[in-house]
Amino acid sequence: MTLNLDAHIPEGPLADKWTNHKFDLNLVAPNNRRKFEVIVVGTGLAGAGAAATLGELGYNVKVFTYHDSPRRAHSIAAQGGINAAKNYRNDGDSIFRLFYDTIKGGDYRSREANVYRLAEVSNNIIDQATAQGVPFAREYGGGLDNRSFGGAQVSRTFYARGQTGQQLLLGAYQALARQIHLGTVTLYNRTEMLDLVLHEGRAVGITTRDLLNGEVSSHSGHAVLMATGGYGNVYFLSTNAKACNVTATWRAHRKGAAFANPSYTQIHPTCIPPADEFQSKLTLMSESLRNDGRIWVPDAEADNRAAADIPEDERDYYLERKYPSFGNLVPRDVASRNAKTVVDEGRGIGPLNNGVYLDFGAAMERFGVDTIQERYGNLFDMYERITGENPYEVPMRIYPATHYTMGGLWVDYNLETTVPGLFALGEANFSDHGANRLGASALMQGLADGYFVAPTTLAGYLADWLGTDPVPIDDPAFTESHTETQDRINRLMSINGTHTVDHYHRELGKVIWEDCGMSRNRAGLERALVEIPQIREQFWTDVKVPGDPNGWNQSLEKALRVADFMEMAELKVRDALHREESCGGHFREEHQTAEGEAQRDDENFAYVAAWEYGGEDIQNDAVLNKEPLEFDNVSLTQRSYK
Amino acid sequence: MSNMLNLTLKVWRQDGPDTAGQFQTYKTTVADDASFLEMLDYVNEELIEADEIPISFDHDCREGICGSCGVMIDGRAHGPQKGTATCQLHMRQFSDGDTIEIEPWRAAGFPIIKDLVVNRAAFDRIIESGGYISVTTGAAEEANAIPIPKHAADAAMDAAACIGCGACVAACPNSAANLFTAAKMQQLNMLPQGQAERYTRSNDMVERMEQFFGSCTNYGECQEACPKEITIDFIAMMNRDYVKSQLVNRRRLGEKKVG
Ligand SMILES: Cc1cc2nc3c(=O)[nH]c(=O)nc-3n(C[C@H](O)[C@H](O)[C@H](O)COP(=O)(O)OP(=O)(O)OC[C@H]3O[C@@H](n4cnc5c(N)ncnc54)[C@H](O)[C@@H]3O)c2cc1C
Ligand code: FES
């Protein structure tokens, strides 16, 4: 171990840590803020929230996105909702309970202090978004409405129809637009970060490619905030937007930022099963559907009767049967794994026997079709558009798909990575969800990091650099990164092989899904560690990237991203292999209870695995560093949702 | 189970903003449960393997929410299915033997970048001019302090559903952006939180819009093309607010002079 993994957790009781820390942190006075240049990469909830807030505070902000507009970030696709500990329902919720549920849901693999802070600022997020005009759902009395979500026994989820992420992102985007208008923030759209620039060991800028004209440029700043999202597309098929990728975080990793828990991936239980070979991505049906939908498969194998023809007593409502107290609302990992089990048993439904039913028949009888339509109308429409089936008449078919990545850049309590001056926010960091993320908590984390945490902690870092200029972009630190990036582009363009980038991406995805997906074992992981380097080798000798690098070139964009996925995938599998326990989304078949539930090993694995980049031979060169996790406020129990 | 469709595609190919473009014809066979963009992916794979340049098109979420995608399909923005963005359109809407014409959005406010990709930055400029409520992070009051009647919240959400794809502009014979601007503006103008800036917002957004886009003459094509089925009633509301803003803002100007 060579890295310093001091998490800088403030002293004091859990509930006072953030307050104490805010007081102890150095500040930057209002008149000094404009002397700082801050680079923010990403305009999702985390990035747009941070860039807007830093602009409001008076910093000079440059914000980057590969999208044409900040509003298109992947956050826009979140459907279900956002948690907060408002306790508007008077059902016993509190900051501590939200903290507790999130720690427990993460299977005790996250840091207490960070998670508590998340719960603490959750209420400010709802206030902020409401003031921005986010049209959250309301009750007839005019107050905010809530619904319940998987993994919790209270109703604490705020939502805006089935478009919560869209509305929260537009709120953050509009706050950002205001700052762009006021001139505190400069927007670089259709600009992709391809490298992080270090000077004397700290982050001082980035190297980018302009997607319109292909120009590679350098940008310098006093600090770099990366809010570049997750790496779920390493699987090729996932619910993530097509362009989501690992390049920013992986390039930062190669420059010294530790990558934490890359094996932790969330497989979402309610997605539409793949229809055929053309499938380009998978569509999530919001988890909120599990509030009213009942999940079942036929008792018998290969029962290809229509759902309506299968009588009640020949159906297996397996979640209700196995988990009477949580039923269909068990956490995502539990729901996903159980779906895989019944499909593997041969009881899958649909034309390819690759799904399970999510049935609203009973709910429609109980509440009426209108209520169900009011609650889920747009989701039902979306389902029908994709499958050609009407879920008011036949049950939905669902199956798990990759959805969210809990792993990410290691950060301390200040959201600073192991590279000084480099901060990671939102899904790009590993900080709050442990080995499994509860529903409606990623939006909460993205906005907590962006609006409230990073703008505060960044000042603590910047205060030391008052009076210094950003490193000039003709410094060798920048010119070397520029040259390396240009070389990488030239190399990809010159291969001129036989297969497309997508071809290799799909090949990689198949291996990872098969051997490092919902359930993992040593033999499979070892096989993947042989196959991934082979695919990577083939990619670098046989990929075909058509067109001109000095102009708009979507194939090149993809090639640069897939090249980084190839390397990252290897680290992900390496991490999964080393973690000889099951926890949250990481299920090792060797480690399960007699009933087939995940079996943690707190004695040996209650730590964050923070991998340090060691060299091109990823699986052998990567160095494992451990941050032990200490729990003073919750007792570690084996999760039980029975 | 899926059926295979044999299709002829006439696709607009254009190298860059300043070059001339033309239709190119391609033949392909796809399953009817593929999405429209999966069909284009498939054509692109074939083009690349045949040493040709793939067709550029914008897309990302492929769930009808990010607003990245959008092409004219047989002369209709987002194609034949109502309330459906291009990425959600599935090939079962077409028949074996069809010829499909695919073009980019055509509007002076949306210059072509390449093939089917256009530059929609003008929409961002409209939002920057006033499409927000000025509330600094941390300055918000308790969320339940302002009760908002359910019908107002619902109406605001109807407007807020806009995905900023630009289909409304592409469908409009005048290339007007009134539906987009009205939806964004009225979401905020209808809510209590949005009142303080209501008339400056109305004025600024309309004036910025007019710098990029044509004038609305009430064809109503925009609401037909909108993948979120946003109603042109919002345009009427915007027009009222704009007219009123001319009076209110002038009066405020007077107040400023006196004060
Ligand atoms: C279908 C779906 C539904 C979901 N539903 C919910 C839900 O109901 N509740 C919930 O809490 N969570 C939900 N999630 C999870 C949640 O939406 C995401 O985790 C969260 O929005 C991530 O936000 P972010 O700001 O970290 O990143 P993103 O929104 O992914 O933004 C990343 C940004 O970084 C930019 N970027 C990335 N790399 C680069 C680069 N190299 N150069 C320049 N720019 C770059 C992108 O352009 C983008 O602007 C859902 C996720 C999916 C897939
Ligand atoms: S790709 Fe996002 S709306 Fe079509």
Image (cartoon, coloured by chain):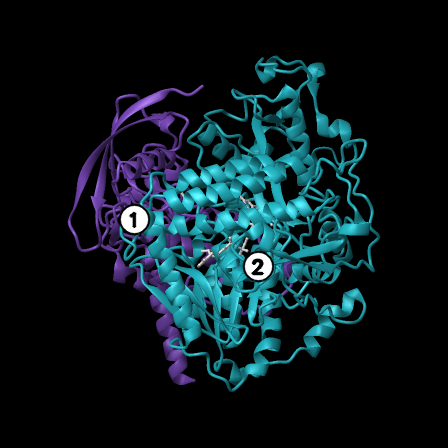
Chain colours: A cyan, B purple
Chain letter of the residue beneath label 1 in the structure image = B
Q: Quadrant of ligand 2?
A: top left
Position of A527 relative to A611 (above/below): above
Q: Quadrant of the C terminus of chain A?
A: top right
Q: Which residue is mark 2?
A: A613
Give the class, few, some or many, for how many residues have Cα within 10 Å of label 2's Cα (few <14, many ≥20).
many
> Which residue shows up at 79% across the image and 31% down it?
A595
Q: Nearer the viewer, residue A617 or B71?
A: A617
Q: Nearer the viewer, residue B104 or A189?
A: A189
Tag 1, which secondary structure? strand
Q: Position of residue A396 (x, y in %)?
A: 56, 27
Position of A62 relative to A298 (above/below): below
> Which residue shows up at 27% across the image and 43% down it?
B171
Position of B200 relative to B170 (above/below): below
**Side of B26 where A639 appears, left or right:** right
| Label total for image | 2
Chain letter of the residue beneath label 2 in the structure image = A
Give the class, few, some or many, for how many residues have Cα within 10 Å of label 1's Cα (few <14, many ≥20).
many
Q: Nearer the viewer, residue A189 or A256?
A: A256
Determine which quarter of the picture holds residue A194.
Answer: bottom left
> Which residue shows up at 57% across the image and 59% down it?
A613
Q: Which mark is residue B131?
A: none
Tag 2, which secondary structure? loop
Callout 1 amino acid: Val
Tell which tag, 2 or 1, sits nearer the viewer. Answer: 2
Mark 2 in CB contact with mark 1 (< 8 angstroms): no
Q: Which residue is mark 1?
A: B117
Callout 2 amino acid: Tyr
